[in-house]
Image (cartoon, helix red, strand yellow):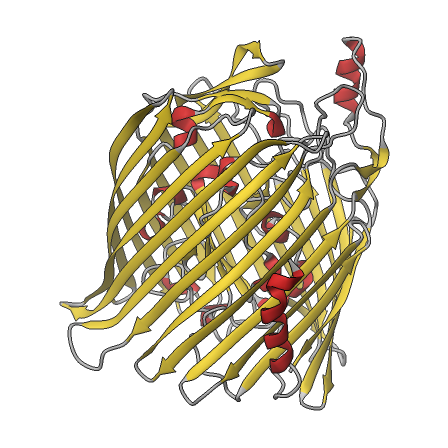
């Protein structure tokens, strides 16, 4: 692995020694100045009806975790599936997996993380410059897989903007006591000529078994097993089989001119991590582990013609070669997953026409999937998607109108019992929205979505034991299109000269043919049987965030308050709660923000989740207390940023209701995450 990363490491080293200091965004960053690349017209946050949250470089410096889910789960509307510190995928408004799409620089991650909670996302948060989160249907640009939301991780692996100086580089080193984490990343960009720029980055991260307070298995689970006369695991202090070893890196080059840019990149990601949870043999520690590799090649560009009917043309291409093996306790491979993914997206933004401005384009995605081994529960399959989309916007004084549509065709061909079965479906997604400017510093947004989602090969054709989540899965080849209608009402407060800013949104979604894994009364291969079935479902919820509320100013800086929270309730037609829905959460933070120093004390309260699905246990509530410290120290032409974050100061036992293994794996205990970042 280190030999494969050597070219990127050497290139980064060449870029690091010289250059001018870069800047880090301050806490008082004006939210309206952030441009969202993950929405059709790349508007500012206040200019779109879509509920969007941007996690800045400064926030990422404090919050970076080994997984994307754990990095984002403290923001309103976002939680995490938590299958250990590495395999933790984001959940948006109570939904994850197959309904949340993850992108890197606007291109599909093309991994298999959506198929199961134990599969890690192949984008390491170490490489992120910022992250965009779209809450609610984002299917117009990203496809039907973004029926609940989308996450776009922004990097500079393909340079798209000219450097202010000829070079920009950074090294970041961090460690975490609860994970025994040792992580380092180095990145750099250099201007080869006036128009050509190159980028390189390399990352390495190792963690040990997570330190936890108390016993790994929950009290409720141990009590149930004791009543049945079955053995329980009393291991305490450590979450067994949760260690990891991850490396990655990339090389990229681009030509940047006045009329646009075009570039290429090649990247590598590899990780080996254990899966905590129940063991195959009663009384034995968990021993299943995953060894994952990905080689990825990207091409992207933008052309801004000086004349003609369009303002710009954008092209995105991605090719991904992914593989992972699941190792059993005896060292043998139980299942091997291999996937080759390709994506092409071409879009054009047209010039204003009769007061309307907009974008249109097409997207093609091909997934070639194969699973082999005695425990492979998914058949070999090929999935092809072709989407056509259009989005238009018009300003009518204080009111702005938005409308969009996307047509998508999907073909799935799966090899079942030496015979190919096909599933061909088309979907149509429609979005209507409006922004009403109440005052210069207050806006109301309304968005209505009609979304349709294709069933996946897993939902259609699964048939076998899925040991990582301890169940026997059965698909249904007759499943049809999943349809939903969503209404979203939002209020945005704040502006360039406003003292504080805030947002609140409320949503309701009705689903017809909602596809989910339902428990059946039966046992197969000593595992409970679940079958993918359809039902009607309703999601209702709200989220809010109030930030930069100034309390007073001191010689050291401004003292500000932040409040945030979210709530989701989800039922099927019988009123039965859906599984793994996050409870009510409320958070607060008080911070001192100076020109160089930031100190914050924060608290995040999780309510007790008593609205549980069949075969789910109630999850106790908890409050996590933390302290953050950042200090910027100029070193001549460089910046040294020191950071420290103390989490779970009370060292309490906390279990996430959104985790499929919550009764086997509590969250980490008291920890200190600290490190430094040098920017050249």
Residue 430: percent from left, percent from top: 26, 45
Residue 368: percent from left, percent from top: 39, 41
- Viewer-nearest residue: 468 or 577: 468
The residue drawn where x is 72% and y is 29% is: 330
The residue drawn where x is 62% and y is 53% is: 71
Q: Does residue 49 appear to the left or right of 233 in the view shown?
A: left
Decide: is 612 above or below 200: above
Outermost residue toward the left? 354
- Viewer-nearest residue: 4 or 316: 4
The residue drawn where x is 42% and y is 62% is: 298
Decide: is 231 above or below 236: above
Q: Which quadrant would residue 248 be assigned to in this image? A: bottom right
Q: Which quadrant would residue 80 be assigned to in this image? A: top right
Decide: is 346 above or below 117: below
- Viewer-nearest residue: 621 or 666: 666
Residue 457: percent from left, percent from top: 39, 31
């Amino acid at each position: 692995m280190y030999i494969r990363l050597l070219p990127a490491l050497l290139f980064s080293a060449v870029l690091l020694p010289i250059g001018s200091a870069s800047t880090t965004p301050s806490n008082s960053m004006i939210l309206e100045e952030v441009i969202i690349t993950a929405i059709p017209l790349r508007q500012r946050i206040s200019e779109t009806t879509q509920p969007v949250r941007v996690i800045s470089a400064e926030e990422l410096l404090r919050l970076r975790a080994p997984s994307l889910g754990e990095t984002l789960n403290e923001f309103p509307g976002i939680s995490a599936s938590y299958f250990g510190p590495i395999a933790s995928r984001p959940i948006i408004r109570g939904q994850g997996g197959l309904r949340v799409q993850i992108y890197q620089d606007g291109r599909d991650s093309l991994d298999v993380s959506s198929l199961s909670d134990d599969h890690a996302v192949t984008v390491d948060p170490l490489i992120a410059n910022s992250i965009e989160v779209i809450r609610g249907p984002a299917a117009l640009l990203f496809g039907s897989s973004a029926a609940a939301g989308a996450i776009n991780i922004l990097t500079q692996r393909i340079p798209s903007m000219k450097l202010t100086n000829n070079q920009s580089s950074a090294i970041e080193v961090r460690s975490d006591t609860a994970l025994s984490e040792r992580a380092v990343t180095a990145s750099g960009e250099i201007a080869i000529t006036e128009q050509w720029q190159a980028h390189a980055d390399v990352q390495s991260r190792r963690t040990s078994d997570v330190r936890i307070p108390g016993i790994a298995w929950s009290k409720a689970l141990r009590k149930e097993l004791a009543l049945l006369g079955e053995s329980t695991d009393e291991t305490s202090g450590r979450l067994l089989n949760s260690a990891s070893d991850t490396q990655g890196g990339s090389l990229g080059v681009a030509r940047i001119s006045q009329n646009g840019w075009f570039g290429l990149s090649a990247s590598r990601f590899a990780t080996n991590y254990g899966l905590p949870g129940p063991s195959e043999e009663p009384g034995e520690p968990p021993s299943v582990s995953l060894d994952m590799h990905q080689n990825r090649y990207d091409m992207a560009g933008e052309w801004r013609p000086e004349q003609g009917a369009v303002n710009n043309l954008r092209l995105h291409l991605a090719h991904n070669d992914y593989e992972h093996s699941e190792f059993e306790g005896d060292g043998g491979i139980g299942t091997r997953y291999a996937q080759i993914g390709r994506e092409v997206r071409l879009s054009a933004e047209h010039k204003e026409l009769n007061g309307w401005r907009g974008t249109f384009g097409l997207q093609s995605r091909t997934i070639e999937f194969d699973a082999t081994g005695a425990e492979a529960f998914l058949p070999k399959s090929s999935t092809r998607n072709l989407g056509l989309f259009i989005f238009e916007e018009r300003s009518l004084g204080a009111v702005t109108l938005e409308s969009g549509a996307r047509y998508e065709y999907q073909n799935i061909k799966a090899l079942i019992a030496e015979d190919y079965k096909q599933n061909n479906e088309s979907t149509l997604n429609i979005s209507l929205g409006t922004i009403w400017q109440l005052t210069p510093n207050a806006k109301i947004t309304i968005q209505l979505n009609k979304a349709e989602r294709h069933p996946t090969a897993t939902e259609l054709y699964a048939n076998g034991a899925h040991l990582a989540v301890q169940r026997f899965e059965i698909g249904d080849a007759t499943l049809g299109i999943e349809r939903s209608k969503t209404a979203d009402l939002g209020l945005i407060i704040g502006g360039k000269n406003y003292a504080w800013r805030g947002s609140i949104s409320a949503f309701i979604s009705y689903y017809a043919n909602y596809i989910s894994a339902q428990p059946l009364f039966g046992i197969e291969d000593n595992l409970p049987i679940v079958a993918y079935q359809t039902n009607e479902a309703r999601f209702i919820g709200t989220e809010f965030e109030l930030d930069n509320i100034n309390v007073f100013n001191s010689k050291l800086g401004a003292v500000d308050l932040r409040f945030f929270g979210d709530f989701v309730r989800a039922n099927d037609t019988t009123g039965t709660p859906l599984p793994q829905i996050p409870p009510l959460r409320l958070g607060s933070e008080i911070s001192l923000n100076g020109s160089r120093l930031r100190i914050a004390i924060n608290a995040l309260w999780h309510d007790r989740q008593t609205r549980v699905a069949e075969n789910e246990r109630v999850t106790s509530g908890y409050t996590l207390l933390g302290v953050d410290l950042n200090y910027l120290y100029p070193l001549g032409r460089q910046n040294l940023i020191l950071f420290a974050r103390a989490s779970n100061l009370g060292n309490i036992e906390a279990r996430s209701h959104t985790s499929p293994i919550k009764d086997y794996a509590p969250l980490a205990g008291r920890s200190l995450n600290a490190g430094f970042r040098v920017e050249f």
